[in-house]
Image (cartoon, rainbow, N blue to C red):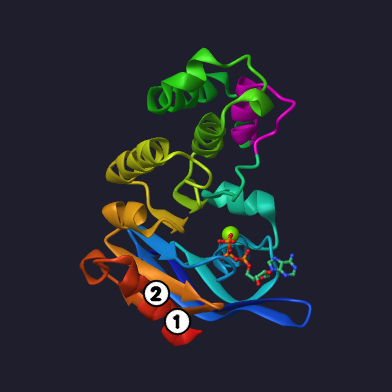
Amino acid sequence: MSEAVLEVQGLSARYGNVCALHPVDLTLGRGELVAVLGPNGAGKSTLLRAIMGLTAGSGRVLFEGAPLARNDARAVTQQGVILVPEGRGVFGPMTVRENLDLGAYLLGNRAGEIAARLERVFALFPRLKDRQTQLAGSLSGGEQQMLAIGRAMMAGPRLLLLDEPSLGLAPRLAAEILETLGDLNRGGLPILLVEQRAPLALKLAKRAYLLSVGRVVAEVTPDQIASPHDLARYYFAAA
Ligand SMILES: Nc1ncnc2c1ncn2[C@@H]1O[C@H](COP(=O)(O)OP(=O)(O)OP(=O)(O)O)[C@@H](O)[C@H]1O
Ligand SMILES: [Mg+2]
């Protein structure tokens, strides 16, 4: 049996006539946290959305050795592949608690399991516990990101994909959130982390794919990226 949790083979995506993602290959091993780095417009979100089947793409995506059911969002969730989208995607007019409960919708009325997951989320993000009845739209940006990750955890992920969780956050809060992702990963959860803030991501990831103009232009280890110039060299070489 393959050791890979996620295998992406020749995955490409287009918007109309524009090719936003040229065939991409990537793998994520058991318990790994791998980063995808790239400048604005590189195709990072498109890659995650194509993996999930939210953007039409051609190519193969295997999860734990079997094809991911990309034509069926519920089935993807059922398989345990959960995306925390760019911009967080929390439901503003609903409370924190209602947002969290939505994450566990596949559990139906299994109250005991829902309560256990809630406790785990509150242990990760105690601030959410204090704000259960607050409307999600009135949370700070950092709290909304915590809620988005918390909601994903309510789904019982076996693989977590995150699209720029540090976007728009002050450096200290961004670091705090990424540290929490590091804790989740050390607990055994495989994570594919899209980030523009390379230094933050490279603190956690042991490997990173560099995306530029819709292509993977390099696969690097953190020691190969000593300064932003090293990244720019890869990006511009491909542009
Ligand atoms: N729905 C869409 N229709 C047409 N073009 C799109 C659509 N979504 C994205 N694109 C284009 O595809 C390319 C890749 O976009 P994508 O959002 O994947 O980049 P990104 O790396 O996530 O950028 P950012 O860091 O700004 O989030 C861009 O040129 C973008 O304009
Ligand atoms: Mg994006």
Label 2 – label 1 distance at C-alpha: 6 Å
Q: Which residue is mark 2?
A: 232
Q: Quadrant of residue 147?
A: top right
Q: Which residues are magenta?
A: 90-105
User: Which residue is drawn at the image coordinates 75% and 26% (left, top)?
Assistant: 93
Above or below, comparing residue 171 to residue 146 in the picture: below
Q: Residue 87 placed where, x, y %?
A: 62, 46
Dividing the picture into quadrants, the one containing residue 198 is: bottom left
Marks 2 and 1 in Cβ contact (< 8 Å) = yes
Q: Secondary structure at mark 1?
A: helix
Seen at 63% across and 17% down, the residue is 134
Q: Residues within 10 Å of mark 1 (few under 14, many from 20)?
A: few
Residue at 50%, 13% (x, y): give it.
Answer: 130
Instruction: Specify whether 188 is left or right of 16.
Output: left
Give the label on residue 163, or none. none
What secondary structure is marked by label 2?
A: helix
Q: Is residue 34 magenta?
A: no
Quarter of the rendering occupied by the N terminus? bottom left
Q: Establish whether ligand 1 lies closer than 8 Å to the Cβ of label 1.
A: no
The spot of residue 170 in percent (x, y) is 45, 39
**In the image, 191: left or right of 206?**
right
Q: Tell me the kind of residue under disc 1.
A: Phe
Query: Residue placed at 42% from the left, 86% from the top?
Result: 237
On the image, numbered disc 1 is attached to which residue?
Answer: 236
